Amino acid sequence: MAKDIEMSTKYDPTAVETGRYAKWNDAGLFKPSGDKKAKPYSVVLPPPNVTGKLHLGHAWDTTLQDMLVRQKRMQGFDTLWVPGMDHAGIATQAKVEARLRDEGVTRYDLGREKFIDQVWEWKDEYASIIKQQWGKLGLSMDYSRERFTLDDGLSDAVKKVFVELYNKGLIYRGEYIINWDPQARTALSDIEVIHQDDEGAFYHVKYAFADDDVTYDGKHYIEIATTRPETMMGDVAVAVHPSDERYKDLVGKTIIVPLVNREVPIIADEYVDPEFGTGMVKITPAHDPNDFLVGNRHNLERINTMNDDASMNERAGKYNGMDRFVARKAIVADLEAGDFMINIEPIVHSVGHSERTGVQVESRLSTQWFVKMKPLAQQALDMQKGDDRVDFYPPRFENTFTSWMDDIHDWVISRQLWWGHQIPAWYNKETGETYVGTEAPTDIENWEQDADVLDTWFSSALWPFSTMGWPDVDAEDFKRYFPTSTLVTGYDIIFFWVARMMFQSKEFTGRRPFENVLIHGLIRDEQGRKMSKSLGNGIDPMDVIEKYGADALRWFLSTGSTPGQDVRFSYTKMDAAWNFINKIWNASRYVIMNLDDDTKAELPAVEDRSLADKWILSRLNATIEHVTEMFDKFEFGEAGRSLYNFIWNDFADWYIEMTKETLNGEDATAKHNVQNTLAYVLDQTLRLLHPIMPFVTEEIWLTMPHDGESLMIAAYPEVKAELNNPAAEKQFQSLVDLITAVRNIRSEANAPMSTPIDLLIKTADVELQAIFNENTDYINRFAHPKAIEIGADVAAPKLAMTAIITGAEIYVPLEELINIEDEIARLEGEAKKFQGEVKRGEGKLGNERFVANAPEAVVAEEQAKLADWKNKLAATEARLNELKNA
C-alpha cells in the first residue's frame, strides 16, 4: 500500500521554508557537536558592515561557507561557524552623518557622546535586518557565539595588539603626508582610495626669476605646469633633475611664486623625471607625498594651506575660507589677470577618490599613527614558505598577496572619526608626555585621550582569533578551533583584510589564521557590469528569495562559476534553478507516494537487484565520490553539474521510469526490493544535496521512513566500494543508447509511440545480445516495438532508418514513412559527426604532451573512445554504401 503523504503537486518555496530556520536554531543544531573525539572544523564569517542590508555578494559568500559547514557537520566534524558584524568605522559614520544632514544636523551639533548614541541606534536597526537575512538564507551559524567588532572582548584584543606593537616600536606617531577625505574629515589608507579618470587641466604658469639679470632661454621666467593651482600658496621650491644639462646653471637660483611673491630656490633632486613636461616641477611638501620626501631631503618648510574640510586656510592669503575648487577658479582668474598664465591644456587624468564618500581625496600633511609594515609583512611572507602556510584557492591569488606584501608601505591606522576603537594613547596636559596602555592613566584628570579612532581594518584583522577568546590563550574555543579551517571571501579585499589577518595572526599567535582561503569573484548583472546604485542594476537577494526561494538562489550562486571568477546574475538562470528543484520535488513525491509503511532506505541483497538497480547504485556511488572530491577542491560548479546530471538524467528520467513496471506489477518481492532501492537512492541524494539546498531537502527527507531528527545532522554519504559496478553501467548504457536511438528515429520519422514498428538489432556481441534479450520489458516499455529481432545475422531492410550504437546496428523498417534519399542524407550527417569525433580523438592522442602528462587511465579512456567512434563511423559508412548501391 502506497504511503499517504501530503506533498503539493508543485514546489512551493514559501511553504517549504517558512519556520524551518527557527526550528533548526531552537533545536541547537547550529552549535558544535561537543564531541571532543571529532576533528574540529571552524569558520569565521567575514563580518558584514552594519552600514545597510546584505547584497547578493554577501549571499554568495555566505552560501559557500554554509555549504562547507553543513557538509563537514554531516561528515562528523565538530563544526563551529562564528557569526558577527563589523562596526565599519568611516562607512557607518558616513551613513549616520548623511541621515543627520537630511535632518539639518551635524555630528558637531550633537557632540561626541550623543552622536555615538545615534550610531548605536543605526547599528541595532541594521544588525536586526542582517540577522533576519541570515535566517532567510539558511545560514547555520552558532548565534550563541555572535560577535561585534566593538564588543568588550574584541576591544580588549585591539588594545593589547596596539600596545604591544607600540612597545615593540612597530607603531609610531608622526607627521606625514596622508590621504585625506575632506567630507568625512579623516585619514585614509592607500587601499581606501579609488582612482578614476576625471577631467582636469595642466595650467602652465610663469615663475619669474628673483634676480632680473637671470634668464632662461631668453626669458625672465621659467614655465611650471600644475594640475592643482590651489596648492601654489604652499610652494617652497622648484626642482630639476641633477643630470639635466638644460638647467644645471639654474640650480641655486631663486624664483618668485606668483600671487604669493615668496622667493623660493631651484633645487636638484633625482625625483624629477627630466622626460616629463618641461622637466621642472614645483615642490609643495604639505600637499603631495613625493614633494614631502623631497622637502625632507632638502630641509624645506612645509606650508599647509588647507583646513580639514578642504577649504583654504590663513596661509592661503586672500583665498582664506574658500572651498578648494572655488579657490582654484579664483587663482586661475588672478593668474590670467596678472599675465602669469601661459596656457591651459585640458586633460583627463587619474584622481584619487574616497572609497566611502566618493569625494576627491587630498594629500594632506597630518600627524597620524602608523604601523611599521616591513617586519610584519616579512613574517607573513616567511610563513608562506613553511608548513603553517595558508593555501589560496585558486592558487594564483597568492601572487596578489605576495606582490602587495613585497611592496608594502607603512599603514596609517588613525582615523579622525568618533565611531570606532578610540586609540589607547593619552597626552599629559602639562608636560605633553605620551602614555600608551590598555588602561587609562591613574591620575586621569591630568591626561587627555587621543580623540582619534583606529582604522576599522585594525580590529577586523584580529577577527579569526579575537572571536575565539584571544587574548585569553586558555579560552576553550581558541585552544580547540584556532587556527580556523577555511576563509571564504572576495578577491577585492585580499589587501584590505586577508593580508592583514595573516600578518597579525602570525605576530600575535605564531600561527596562520586559517588553513585555506577560498577566493570568489564579484556578482555582476547580465551584461557583466558591476552592480551599483548609480547604474540602478542592484538586486536585493531577499526579493529573489521571495520569488524563487532560498534554495534556488543558493543553487544558482554555488554552481554558477568556478573559484576566483565573477558570476552574472540572471533571472533566466533563476528560472532554471527553480525548475530543477521542482523536478527534485516531483521525483521525490512520486517515490515517497510509492513507498509502503514497512519500506526502509536499505538495499536488497545483491542477487535481488535488477540491472537497473545495479546501474543506479553504481552511478550514485560515482556521484558521491565526485561531489565529495569537488567540495574538497572548492569546485562547487563541478559538484553541481554532477548532481544535476545524476538527479535529472539518471534518477528521474531513467531509473524512476524503469521502476514503474515493477511498482505496478504483481511481484510483491520485486516491488518491495524496488521500493527499498528507491528510498535508499533518494535518501542518499537528499543528503548529498543538503549542504546546497537545506530547506527543500529537509522537507522531503522528513516525510521519508527513518528515525532521524534532522537531515542537518544525518551522516553524509560515503563511497561504498561494493556498489561500484562498471559492468552494470556499461550494460545499462547500452539499453539507454538503444532506447534513445529508437526514440530519435520515431521523432525524425514522425512516428509516435502509437505507430507500430519492428525493431531489428544486429550485433555479434554475445553479451549485448543477452542484455537486450533479458531486458525486453524495458525495451517494450520505452520503445514500443510490435516485434523485436536480435542477432548477428539480422539483415538490414532497404527502406529502414538506421542508428549506430556501441556494438550494435539498429534498423527500424518504415517503408511508408521514409524515402531512401532522406535516409542517405541523414546518415551522411551522422557520418560527418563521427568523423569529427575521430579527428578530435586522433588530435588529442597525437599530442605528445597530453599522452606523456595525462594519467594512464585518462589516456586509456581516450583510446577506447576513439576506437568506439571509429567503429561507429565504419558501420555508418558501410550502411551508406548499402543504401547507395541498393
Image (tube, rainbow, N blue to C red):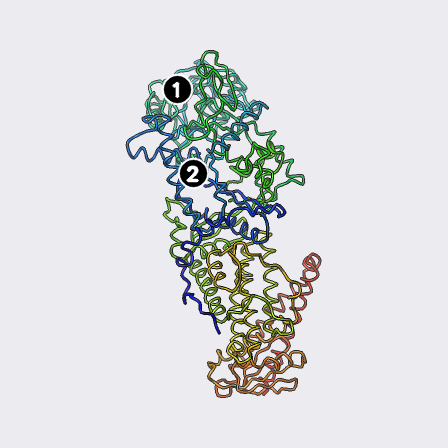
Position of the C terminus, as image quadrant, is bottom right
**SS state under label 2:** strand
Q: In front: 97, or 287? A: 97
* 10 Å crowding of disc 1: few (<14), some (14-19), many (20+): many
Q: Residue 72 appears at what percent x and percent y?
A: 57, 51
Which residue is drawn at the image coordinates 59% and 60% (left, top)? 624
Q: Residue furthest top?
A: 430
Q: Label 2 to label 1, Cα distance in Å?
A: 29 Å
Q: In front: 394, or 673? A: 673
From this view, report whether residue 509 is shown above or below residue 803. above
In the image, 732: left or right of 300? right
Q: Nearer the viewer, mark 2 or mark 1?
A: 2
In the image, 878: left or right of 496? right
Q: In front: 186, or 165? A: 165
Q: Tell me whether the residue at label 2 lies in contact with that at label 1, contact meaning CB atoms closer than 8 angstroms.
A: no
- Name the residue beneath numbered marker 2: 197
* 10 Å crowding of disc 2: few (<14), some (14-19), many (20+): few
Q: Amino acid at mark 1?
A: Pro
Q: In front: 694, or 829? A: 694
Q: Amino acid at mark 2?
A: Asp
> Residue 740 appears in which quarter of the rendering?
bottom right
Q: Residue 853 appears at what percent x and percent y?
A: 69, 56
- Name the residue beneath numbered marker 1: 258
From this view, report whether residue 149 is shown above or below residue 672. above
Q: Residue 616 appears at what percent x and percent y?
A: 58, 69
